[in-house]
Every structure is written in structure tokens, then in C-alpha cells.
Image (cartoon, rainbow, N blue to C red):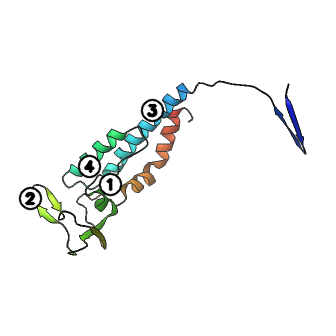
């Protein structure tokens, strides 16, 4: 028998009804949409990333690919990712100097150096590169990301 509670303007009817809904189909669609989105974000960020030797992009892409489908994207792999992503010249907090250059390796700070940002912007070799490249890609492609995710997930 139903349990009825009357209130001013509405009534609530409590009854013991059980419904079992299988979400397997939706789960598969949502997983496909997340996998697509993670990969697309990485592809859309790449043109705005610095690529002096391509090593940074390769490491970042590899780390991101390992997480694809989890909802996590590596935008800037270490050890120098934060430095590049922020777009500011960093210096050693003790010496006040920038990195020294190791031939065939590239710029490196002394071991254990704590870095601090300066007010000077980095000069990237890629003319399209910008700091905070995820934000740049999201601003340019974000609406397309939403549109495609909806389509893949079955809601668009």
C-alpha cells in the first residue's frame, strides 16, 4: 500500500517500486568520448607548444597517451615543463642565473636548484608557441570538443 503525505499545493506518494537500469551501453559511450577528448586536447595543444628539439613534445605526448581515457592530460612534462608552460624566464634562486647549456642535451640548471620566475617572457623558437598552451587550445577548440563529446556519448 502506498504511503501518502499531503502538503499545501502538492502530495508525495511513497511506494516500494524497484527499477533496475543497465548503464553498460552508456558507460562504453562515455569511455569512448573521454578517450577521444583526452587525445584531441593533446593534438590541439601541440601547435602552441615550444618545440626546439621536439623532445619536450615527445615526452609530453607519451606521458599523456599513457593516461588517455582517464580524464587527465599532461600539458607540460617535467623536468622543464612548468618553466616552459609558464612562459617566464626562470633563474636559480641562489645564483640568480639561468641554466647552463650542455651540448647535444640543452639547457640545464645545477642539480637541486630551486627556480624562481622573473618578469621576462620566454622567447620560443616556435612562432606559434604561447605560454599556457592548454588555455589557448581550449579557447580556440573548446566548443568543438564539447560538440564532439556529446556526439560520441550519444547526446548530441
Q: Which residue is mark 3?
A: 32
Q: Which residue is mark 2?
A: 103
Q: Are marks 1 and 3 in contact (CB under 8 Å)?
A: no
| Residue 20 sits in quarter | top right
Q: Which residue is mark 4?
A: 57
Q: Secondary structure at mark 1?
A: helix
Q: Secondary structure at mark 3?
A: helix
Q: Are marks 4 and 3 in contact (CB under 8 Å)?
A: no
Q: Residues within 10 Å of mark 1 (few under 14, many from 20)?
A: many
Q: CA distance from mark 4 to mark 3?
A: 24 Å
Could you say which disc has been placed on residue 48 in the image? 1
| Residue 61 sits in quarter | top left
Q: CA distance from mark 2 to mark 4?
A: 20 Å
- x%, y% of residue 112? 22, 64
Q: CA distance from mark 1 to mark 4?
A: 11 Å
First in sequence, mark 1 or 4: give its number: 1
Amino acid at each position: 500500500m502506498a504511503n501518502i503525505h499531503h502538503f499545501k499545493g502538492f502530495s508525495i506518494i511513497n511506494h516500494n517500486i524497484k527499477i533496475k537500469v543497465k548503464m553498460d551501453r552508456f558507460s562504453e559511450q562515455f569511455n569512448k568520448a573521454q578517450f577521444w577528448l583526452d587525445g584531441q586536447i593533446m593534438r590541439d595543444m601541440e601547435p602552441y607548444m615550444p618545440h626546439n628539439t621536439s623532445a619536450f613534445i615527445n615526452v609530453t605526448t607519451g606521458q599523456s597517451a599513457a593516461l588517455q581515457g582517464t580524464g587527465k592530460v599532461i600539458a607540460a612534462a617535467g623536468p622543464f615543463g612548468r618553466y616552459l608552460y609558464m612562459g617566464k624566464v626562470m633563474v636559480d634562486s641562489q645564483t640568480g642565473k639561468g641554466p647552463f647549456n650542455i651540448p647535444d642535451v640543452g639547457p640545464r640548471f645545477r642539480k637541486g636548484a630551486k627556480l624562481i620566475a622573473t618578469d621576462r617572457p620566454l622567447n620560443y623558437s616556435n612562432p606559434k608557441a604561447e605560454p599556457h598552451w592548454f588555455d589557448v587550445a581550449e579557447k580556440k577548440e573548446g566548443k568543438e570538443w564539447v560538440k564532439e563529446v556529446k556526439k560520441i556519448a550519444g547526446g548530441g
